[in-house]
Each structure stands twice: as structure tokens, then as C-alpha cells.
Amino acid sequence: MPAARKVISRETGIEEKEYKWGFVINVKQEVAPKGLNEEIVRLISAKKGEPDWMTEWRLRAYRHWQSLGYQEPKWAKIHHPPIDFQDIVYYAGLAPRDGGRPKGLEDIDPELKKAFDKLGIPLEEQKRLAGVAVDAVLDSVSVATTFQKTLEELGIIFCPISEAIQKHPELVRKYLGSVVPYTDNFYAALNSAVFSDGTFVYVPPGVRCPMDLMTYFRINEAEAGQFERTLIIADKGAYVSYLEGCTAPIRKRHQLHAAVVELIALDDAEIKYSTLQNWYPGDKEGRGGVYNFVTKRGICLGRNSKISWTQVETGSAITWKYPSVILRGDNSVGEFYSVALVNNYQQADTGTKMIHMGKNTRSTIIAKGISAGHGQNTYRGLVKIMPTAENARNFTRCDSLLIGSRCAAHTVPYLEVRNPTARIEHEATTSKVSDEQLFYLMSRGIAEEDAQYMIINGFCRGVFQELPFEFAMEASQLLRVSLEGTVG
Amino acid sequence: MESEAKTPLLEIRGLRAGIGDVEILKGIDLTVYPGEVHAIMGPNGSGKSTFVSVLAGKPDFEVMGGEVLYLGKDLLAMAPDERAREGLFLALQYPVELPGVRMREFLRTALDAVREHRGLPKLAVREFNRLLQEKARELGFDQEFLKRNVNEGFSGGEKKRNEIMQLLLLEPRLALLDETDSGLDIDALRIVANGINKFRGPDRAIILVTHYQRILNYVTPDRVHVLINGRIVISGGRELALELEAKGYEWIRQTVEAG
């Protein structure tokens, strides 16, 4: 392998080759004072020029959050020192000198363009990712959205949520908080109060979105939390495939990321949602790294609708997320495909909830956990069959792969069955990369490290094959980078 | 033998090996020249599998003494993947399943590694596919087979044929075949034997481990060695295998003990 160029992070003195996305983007940002109170909530709302109904909604969420008394949920198998929620910056956006959000793609700060290029996300359409429209979000603000015109012609709305609040208030008012109300949990309440940007997608009836839509989230400010909000609606008979990718610079301190994603699928609609989560995982001793506390949920509102989550979680110091599906429409389908990798001192508590309400609803859960170093990996999943869900079906498979002897994998499945016609299957395995497998590959001339990755990749195949091709390639490279030094 | 003038492909002197403190191979001497086929026969537990596994570098076994020269190089100092790139190939008695690893991807990676070591360029996708199809056909596999995961859900016979297909694809200098014939019905045995015969050539050699002389009806050996209790107790030509079949291993034991 070629020797990596040594790049040392200016802030932390940490060598960057372990996390090559760890650079800081040099653009002027406007940063709110630390801490959270009604003033800050109003400030964020004012920055966005929001209508009163939105400000009021935020304030209601804030008051609810405050009533929870800084008591974050404690049931997950994760450990961290208490978070000082008054020591976080809740808003950071491009300074007004740069005109805030650039007017058009040609108006973007070259420094910013370069940075996103370096991340592999070119913002110019001529350099576009093959068949992917991108919304780029830096800290609290969406900085660019590509291909908007092409999509507009089909009636597809793909824009920052701040823009949707202005231009499509009827859709936002109808659906925002309809799947994840601000009373849902601590972090959902926090997000509802302070979310600053994120992506809004609406696909009109009968339209099949011709390209993948992608949001690239980037944390840049040292002390900023990121609280994005994504809302995707597929109207009757519509189809959309949505991708999200995330990175952050190397920072000494932990950073908070608390997003909310809501998906709504009407009759015969399908939403496919894929995530590559690569937030800064912290260093080898577990210092720094992003706390990724995310609420993602979709509802199959209509008959024959389908929502499919695919996630590859390799980053973050702590991951706490359960992309779920409420199967309300008859014959609706929910899927969850997940690879969660922990290395060094990373912790992941992730899984899904499949709530069956409609008749003949089906769900599939395939969860693959890879643990290395001192990593702690927990699968936590709920399959709930309501009395109305005649003939519901679920298949769950949880596989854990352990690398080394100091890591751990835990599987916590919850089953709640309230209709006797339900059929539920659960399979679980725990394995190690066996010496026999390694020897077999090596006896064919394949070097030990390559042999290890081939086996690990094979372990993830059932999930990777659900990703769009280029994303799958990237996922498999990400896996390799994340495990560097632990195998071979 | 005629080959005295040639350089040996493999020279084994006093090889001792085992697991933990238990010695299984108790001093083996064997010289193999290019072009030769050596059959290693012997009863269960005599150390036949251990012998070829040690040559391939299987980490379960510990070498306790002796030396092995492969084309004049110290074979025992090499890692298993190096041995393979240098031209050694072990067809396993029990090929391992690799869940999620596709046949095509596995064979491509292996062939690339071996070719790179030989200073050959990587094959273009089309060339590789053509080559792979050809080898698959020779072993009686169809296209669908190449889309499967390595050995996953393969029948016993498919696993053995798969080993020989890899042998033909990777074109090593020295093939170690560990009971490739066991558990095969007569048709599969013919296919496998055909594959082995295709592999034979003046620059290549084979060490074939077997219980039965049945496969030797198809693959004619130059030398037959009988391994009992970790030692080669008798060596001979093709006729030794036939005699063995007629009289059994007990006969050898008695002959050897009688001196």
C-alpha cells in the first residue's frame, strides 16, 4: 500500500490519515452565542424569516423539551459523561457578507466549492455525480442544491426545508411532526425547537423520480451542534430513492448531532432511503467524535406502499438511532437493512421498529454488526403486531461479527404480538472470521489483509446489495478504512 | 528415474510436524521433479492430510524439524499466501464456505494476485470472463454456478470439482491434492480426474493424497508412497498401489515389521 501523506490536524495534533474527511472548511460563518433559551429559538426562526406558525411550533417544542429537565433517554446501552446543553452552539450559518445562502450555483464561495469537491461532492452540475441531485448542508444551512430545474419540470420538489417552509407551507404544515411529533422523545423535542436546515422532498402522484436525490451533511463549526430536519413525501404511486452522507472535521471535543427524519408514503408509493454515516468517530483513545442521536421514522400511510431503510454506520463516537416504519396501509411493506461498525471506543445502539397496523403487512429486518477494538455494538429492535394487523409477517436476521477479543456485540429483540394470525421469524448468529476461511483464501495467493476484508465484505453483502452501486462501493471502502490496523 | 539431471521442484528432508506437543509427521524425505505425479497412500490417521497441509502452510500445524526446498527456496519460511503466489496449490479435503463472497470476485482476486507475482498484467474483464467460463465448463459447471457464494450450499462433489477448477485457473507449478477423490460418484470422479490430467505437464508436478487406488486408474502416478504412522514406509511404482488394494495396509505393516 502506498505510504499515506502525513497530515496533522491543526487543532488537535491528530494525524488525519485515519479520518481523511477531517479537515476544516475556511468560510466566514455567523455563529449564535452558546446555549439554548427562547431567544435563541426566536433568533433561529428569524434568521430563516419564518412565518409565525413555524416560530410558535418551535417554541412549543422548546417548552416541551425544557419540561423534560435535561433528562435524556437512559435505556440504551451507551455511556457518556453528561452533556451540557447550554455549552453548545445552536446556529452557525454562512455570514451575510457572503450573502447567506448563495443565490445560485455560480454564486458559491470557491473555498466552499473546493471543500465539497474534496469530499467527493462536486456542486457544479457539469461535474455532477452520475444521476444524483445533491443538497449540500454545512452546519445549519443548506449551501447548494443541484438539478432543481430538471426536477421541477416533473413537479418534484427538492429543496432546503427552510425554503419549503416559505414556498410550500401547506405541505410542511400538514406533514411536519406528523410521524415524529416533538413529544416523541428528548432529542426529537430538541431538534424541533432548533432545527435550522435539512432537506424537503415531495414527489407528486404517479411520478417516478428519475435520479437519486442526495443530501450531504457536513459539520464544520467547532462548537456547533447539527440539527437537521428531513421531510420526504411520496404521493400516490410515486417513487423516490434518497441518499444521505455525512462527515465532520476532527475535533477534540464531542459534538452533538440530533436529526429528525420523517417519511410519508401514500397509496402505492415507495421510498428508498440510504445512509452512509461517517461522522468523526473520535481518536483511538475515544477522545472526541460525534454523538449521533437521531430519530428516523417513516409511515406507510397508503395501501401497497413501501418504505425501505438501508444504513451503513461506520462513524460517530456514539450512534443512537432506530429508523422505523409504521405499516398503517394494508399490504404495505417495511424494510430495514443495516451494517453498524464500531472500532476503538465507539458505541452503537441501533436497530429498528416495525409497527404493523394494516392487514397483510410485511417487514424484513437484516442487521449486521461488526465490532472491533473496544467497540460496543447493540442491535435493538421492536416488532409490534397490532390487533388490526391480520396476516402480518416479519422476518428478522441479526448477525454479529467480532474482530479481536475486547469488543462486544449485544442483540436485544423485542416482540409484541397482539394478533394470532401473525407469523414472525427471528434468526441470530455471532461469528468470528475463522482461521479456516482465512487460510482458504490465502492458500489461493490472496494476502491476509485482503482476505480479511473479503470475508467481512461477504458478511455485509445482504445489506450492501440494497445500496445504489456507487454508494455500495464507497461503503465497502469505508469499512476498510474504519478497520485499518485492526485486521491483518 | 530419467529426471536426475533436472532441478527438483520440491526437496523434503527429515520433515517433522504436529499439533501442540503431538508429533504427527516423524521424519519425511521426498524429492519431486517437474513432470512427476506422486501418490501418497496410507490408512486413516497416518498423517497424509497433515503432510500436504504443512507444505501449504496451514497454521494449525507446527513444524518441529527438517527442511523443505521449493525451487531451491526455503518453503517453510514463507506465509501461506506467498507459497501460493510462488506456485503451490492445495486442493482441500474439506473446502471452506465463504458466506457472501461471490465465486467470481474470489477467483478474480486470486488470479490477479498470482498473475501480478508472475509479472503478468491483469486480465481485462472480458478475457477473464471467457477464461472462467472455459474452466467452469471443463469441470461441468454452468453460468449460474459462478454467481453463487464460494462453496456455500455446494454438494460434496461440487466442492471437489470447484477445487480442481481453481487449480486449472491458477496454473500453479505444484499441486497438492488432499483426498480430492473421496466422496465422489463415478461421473464426478471422471470429471475431476480429467481436470487433473489436463493440469499435468512437463513443468508441473502433483502430490496426490488418496485412500483408494480407484483414482489412480485415471491419473497414472509415477511414484506411489505409503505413509504409516508419520513415516513413508515403502515406495514404488504404479504396481504398488494395485498390490495394496489386493492385500490391504495390514500387509504393508507386516512386511515393514518383518524388515
Image (cartoon, grey):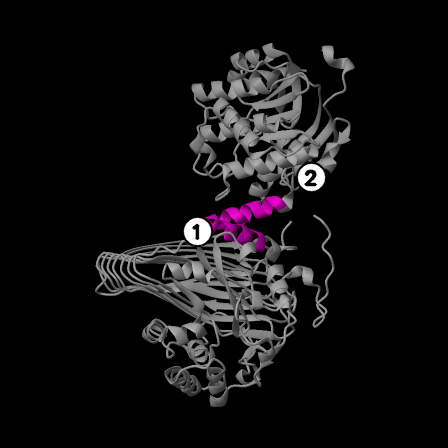
**Mark 2 Cα within 10 Å, few/some/many (few <14, many 20+)?**
some
Q: Position of residue A229 (x, y in %)?
A: 44, 72
> Which of B254/B236 is in front?
B236
Which residue has dot 1 on it? A466
Give the image location of residue A316, x and y in percent.
Answer: 56, 66
Residue A317 location, quadrant: bottom right
Q: Is the same chain shared between marks 2 and 1?
A: no
Q: Nearer the viewer, residue B209 or A1?
A: A1
Q: Which quarter of the rendering shows the C terminus of chain B?
A: top right
Circles 2 and 1: CB distance less than 8 Å?
A: no
Q: Which residues are magenta?
A: A450-478
Circle on res. B79: 2
Quadrant location, the N terminus of chain B: top right
Judge the density around disc 1: few (<14), some (14-19), many (≥20) Cα neighbours within 10 Å: some
Q: Which image quadrant for residue A139?
A: bottom right
Q: Is residue A70 above or below residue B13?
A: below
